[in-house]
Amino acid sequence: MSRQNRSKLSVVLRSIITCLILAVLASFVVSSKRLILDQISVWEYQPSSEIEGLINRSGMGEHGKFLFLASQPLLAKSTDDVQTFNSTCSNVERTTSILGCYSDYKIYLFDVTDTKLDGVRETTAAHEMLHAAYLRMNDKDKTDVNKLLEAEADKLKANTDFNERMAYYDRNEPGQRDNELHSVIGTEIADISPDLETYYKKYFSDRRKVIILNAKYISVFQKISSRAKELNAELTALAENIKNNAAQYNADVQAVNSSITTFNSNASNGYFTSQSQFNAERANLTSQVSNLSQARAKINSDITKYGTLLDEYNSIASESKKLNNSLDSTLVPAPSV
């Protein structure tokens, strides 16, 4: 081969190699664009101590923390922040409180301050972080993870609360079932397959932390709901007993009054032939009157008990309303003078 031809071949090879390098670099830049932007977001964001607390208490690992901070989470505390939260995280159904959302690569969290609901902020933070993680997955990884998620969802078919939750998402976020499963299962379901547990280790150093916190605040509502159902059943049964016993008491009073009238009439017109007969019928009436007094006392006792149970029921209803209000971002603080 002549020197000239070798020179031409060398130029062609260099051009091909250059093109290949540029193509690889272009592919790398495209695939790494989100990572680069995430890193810049992390550098620009200065997390507060509360945000750091959410990360630590929820059990996020390094990658989970990175995704959370890359989403520059806003913990809505001030009136302006709450308004931003509401405008960004608006939902169709106001029957369910919205505690957080992931929008335009950012996380928004409502600041729930009621100490009885400790754990709700951490659960929400981890939930939204997993949305950020799901968005960054490639199609193949999503397909693989979705199979694991659907297998877990199939195990929860008998769980009414879980099914209602997913039905809500289907209505308000159509097409996002697996995305929501990814966050719900990751933060709320303790027992999952080993493969899925291994997968979540990408984002959590200790997933049990967020599972425990979620169960902690959910149990508050479960206890209230359970006691309210018990009280409602007791009140319904007791009201029915009072009604029936009062009706029977009133009928018995009429009957005894009639017997007393007859007894007095008989005593006046010489009906009784002996003192023993008189005493026997008088004793019988006295016993009936005593039974009426006991029945009346029992009814009054039941009425008192009903009032006590009703007070407890109303107190629980008030507490439930207060807790639900603390989760409602649309209830802005009252103005001060």
Image: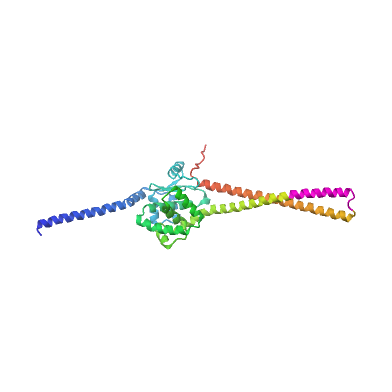
Q: Name the spot of residue 123 as percent of width and height, x first.
A: 46, 53
Circle count: 0
Q: Name the spot of residue 323 as percent of width and height, x first.
A: 53, 48
**Residue farthest along the bottom direction in this orientation:** 194
**Residue farthest along the left direction in this orientation:** 2
User: Does the magenta portion include 312?
Assistant: no
Residue drawn where x is 79% and y is 50% of the image:
256
User: Does the magenta portion include 266?
Assistant: yes
Residue drawn where x is 67% and y is 51% of the image:
240
Is residue 119 visible from the viewing direction of this image? no
Q: Name the spot of residue 330 as percent of width and height, x first.
A: 49, 43
* Magenta highlight range: 249-272
Residue closer to the observer: 335 or 211 = 211
Q: Looking at the picture, does residue 218 appear above or below residue 80?
A: below
Q: Name the spot of residue 29 as percent of width and height, x first.
A: 29, 52
Task: Using residue 138 as the reference point, say whether residue 274 is left or right of it.
Answer: right
